[in-house]
Image (cartoon, rainbow, N blue to C red):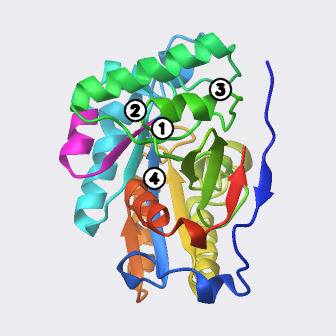
Amino acid sequence: MTFNYPKVTRSRQLGSVQEERPAWPNNARCVVAFTVDFDGTGNEVGKGLEPFGAHSAGRYSARRGVDRHLDMLERLGIPATFFVPGYDAECSPDVVKRIAAAGHEVAAHGYVHEGMLLEAEEEVRRLTLTHTILSDLLGTAPRGWRSPSGQKTSVTLPTLRSLGYQYDSSDKDADTPYMLDIGNGQHMVEIPNNTYSLDDFPFFNFSMTPVSEVVEQWKKEFDCRYAEGGFFMLTVHPRAGWGSGTPSRTRAIEETLRYIQRHGDVHFVRLIDLFEHVNQFPQSFDEVRV
C-alpha cells in the first residue's frame, strides 16, 4: 500500500489572513459548526465485538442519544452535520431519516467505523457501499465524508471524488478550511476537525474530565477563535460511555452552544454550507496538494 504525503502550496500572498479572506457566510465574525459522529454499534462490530452487555454503549446512539441531540438542536434553532456509518444506517434507518427530516446534513463516516487501514480494493468497496446505503435511504447522495479513524490512503480522496463527494473533514492541520488539490484537475475542500480539544471523546474516554470542566474548555476555545474572527467546530458522539448522548452531557453541550449564541456576529452552518462558501472563493484559502 502506498501513500502520497501532502505538499502545502499557497495560491496567493495573504499578508493578513483576517483582513483578506472573504467575509464568512452571513457576514459573520465567526462561523460555528456543530458536528455529530453517530458512532453506534458499528464501532463494536468493526472490532469483532458483539454489541451487547459491556459492549452495548453504541446502541445508545440510536435508542436515546441521537433523538436527545435532535431535540436540543430544535430548541436552539441550530443546523448540524451528522456523520453516519453505513452499518448504523442499515441498523437504524428511521433514526437517520429523522436527522435528514429535521433539516440536518447527513454525511458519510465509514461502514463499521473502521479503525484500520484497508487494502485498496476493500477500501473502495466499503466507501462505495456506505455511499449507496445513505443515498438509497435518503434519496440524496452524501457530499461530505469524515474518516472514522482519521486515516486515509492514496485511494481515499480520488474514490470519494469519483462518487461525488465535495469535502472531507478528517485532518487536524489547520484552524480554518482549505482547498485540496487531489490531482488530475480535481479538487475538494478540507474542513479540519480538531479531535483533541473540540471533541468529547478524549475528555470522557482518556482523561475522564468532569463535565463542568469540559464546558469551560470548550468556551475558552471558542473565545479565542471568536477573537480571531475564525472558525469553531465542535464534534460530539451520541453514545453512552465516552459519548455525550446522556442527559448531563447533552446539557453541557447545550450550555456551550447557548454561550456561543450570546455572542454577536456568529453564524452556525452545516458543513455542506461551509463548503459552498469556500468553493465560491477558492483563491482566498490555502491549498494543499495530495
| Residue at left offset 56%, top offset 60% | 211
Q: Which circle, 2 or 4, is nearer the viewer? A: 4
Q: Amino acid at mark 3?
A: Val
Q: Which residue is mark 1?
A: 240
Q: Nearer the viewer, residue 132 or 81?
A: 132
Under tag 2, what secondary structure?
Answer: helix
Q: Are marks 3 and 1 in contact (CB under 8 Å)?
A: no
Would you place residue 231 above or below residue 172 in this image? below
Magenta segment includes 239: no
Q: Nearer the viewer, residue 245 or 45?
A: 45
Q: Which circle, 4 or 1, is nearer the viewer? A: 4
Q: Which residue is mark 2?
A: 60
Q: Are marks 2 and 1 in contact (CB under 8 Å)?
A: yes
The span from disc 3 to disc 4 (Cα, nearest Å) is 25 Å
| Quadrant of the rendering where the C terminus is positioned | top right
Q: Which residue is mark 4?
A: 35
Would you place residue 115 above or below residue 222 in this image? above
Q: Are marks 2 and 3 in contact (CB under 8 Å)?
A: no
The span from disc 4 to disc 1 (Cα, nearest Å) is 17 Å
Would you place residue 169 above or below residue 125 in this image? below
Magenta segment includes 105: yes
Q: Are marks 3 and 4 in contact (CB under 8 Å)?
A: no
Lower sequence index among marks 2 and 4? 4
Q: Which residues are magenta?
A: 96-108
Q: Residue 36 in the image: x percent, y percent?
A: 44, 47
